[in-house]
Image (cartoon, rainbow, N blue to C red):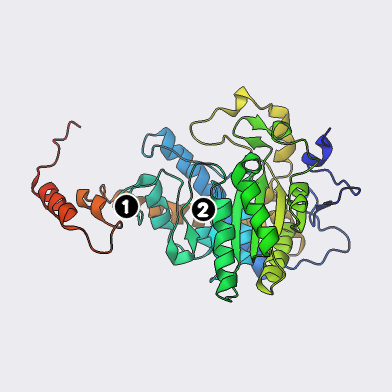
Amino acid sequence: MADEHARDGEVDSASPTPLFKMLGDDGALAAGRVPRASREIALRAYRELKRLRVLDARMMLLQRQGRIGFYGTCTGQEAVPIASALALAPSDWVFQALRESSMMLVRGFPLAKYIAQIFGNSHDDLKGRMQPSHMSSKSVNQVSWSSCIGTQIPQAVGAAWAAKQRKEKTVVLGFMGDGATSEADFHAGLTFAGVFHVPCVLVCQNNHWAISVPAARQTASASFAMKGLAYGVPSFRVDGNDFLAVYEVVSAAAERARTGEGPSFIECLTSRIRAHSSSDDPTRYRSQEEVDVWLKRDPVQRLKSYLESIGALDDAADEKLEKELNEEISQAITEVERHGPPERDTIFDDVYATLPWHLDEQREELRRSPTAPSHG
């Protein structure tokens, strides 16, 4: 039977993939650990983690008010995407899953444009075509993803294979949840990555639940990292609520990929302490006791405690930061809500480089047609 303690985040020194940690649950740096992340990077990370936490809370409030239709929070899992984004070069590519879109903000994507995707209005670069919380942008090398679980895994591996064929120094990060490891695309992707030694880093956010299906129903393996080993891919387990540890492991894996040492598979142990999405009620399948355990491992609080211990943060600075973040998000929402829905004829855009004659005729007919009357 699988080791349930290992799945809950306890260190199993006998495992071929022992859990790597740098911070204790209280945020104290483990003895003998020297962080790869500098003071400046850790401070930047804290700002990004906290902005994401505040943004998630605000978006859920807007959803409950009926101002947006759907939202998927990252609450409790902020350390993995933020650390991964900071470990990358601007030229690297990201094939995301549900809880990594925030990497776009770290990589320079405008906050208002990011929020506009949730509204799906004319300020959205994707023109309102994607389900909310499905952000992507070529401007920051993050690829659109599908709610069909695991499809991005072979796509990420294929992109890494292309980079290798072109002799580029590009690294490709591909993300998945624990549930995706039960999909056929996981088998195809890991097999290809191992056999062809491609420059990719595959990251599994093991939050212990594939919506309502527990990890114990996903696999009989003692860890998900062991699955990577089975495909001949160097694999690691890391405390996904420990920013310093995730940054360390992802940075090292990216360096190996960039220097021709091939792929890595990283299992990040974490937990979404809120619902899977605004459409979910986790009380129907998960106990409050489990949530309480993970609340004590909160990635935002742990990094805050670490920064306080090295004299990089105090209560006054933290309060000032929270005020700045709330103002930044409020201004972005105000900007987004000034925009109306996408123009109707944008449905003809982005399919053909040159629009075929018959579609051009249809577009002109649409432009001549009156808009539907408002019943508001």
Q: Which amino acid type is marked by label 1?
A: Lys
Residue denoted by label 1: 127
Question: Could you tell me residue 156's position as x and y percent?
Answer: 56, 58
Residue nearest the viewer, comparing 269 with 147: 147
Instruction: Count neighbours of disc 1 (C-alpha within 10 A) and say few if under 14, some if 14 to 19, many if 20 or more.
Output: some
Q: Is residue 241 visible?
A: no
Residue 337 visible from this viewpoint = yes
Judge whether 103 appears above or below 241 on screen.
below
Instruction: Tell me which residue sits at (35%, 57%) in the image.
Output: 125
Is 316 on the left-hand or right-hand side of 347? right
Where, quadrant-wise, is the N terminus in this rendering?
top right
> Which residue lies at the image location 55% right of the left edge and 42% below the top edge?
149
Q: Amino acid at mark 2?
A: Ser
Which residue sits furthest front? 195
Name the spot of residue 68 as percent of width and height, x first: 38, 39
Q: Position of residue 79 (x, y in %)?
A: 65, 53
Q: Which mark is residue 101?
A: 2
Per the model, the C-alpha gap separating discs 1 and 2 is 17 Å
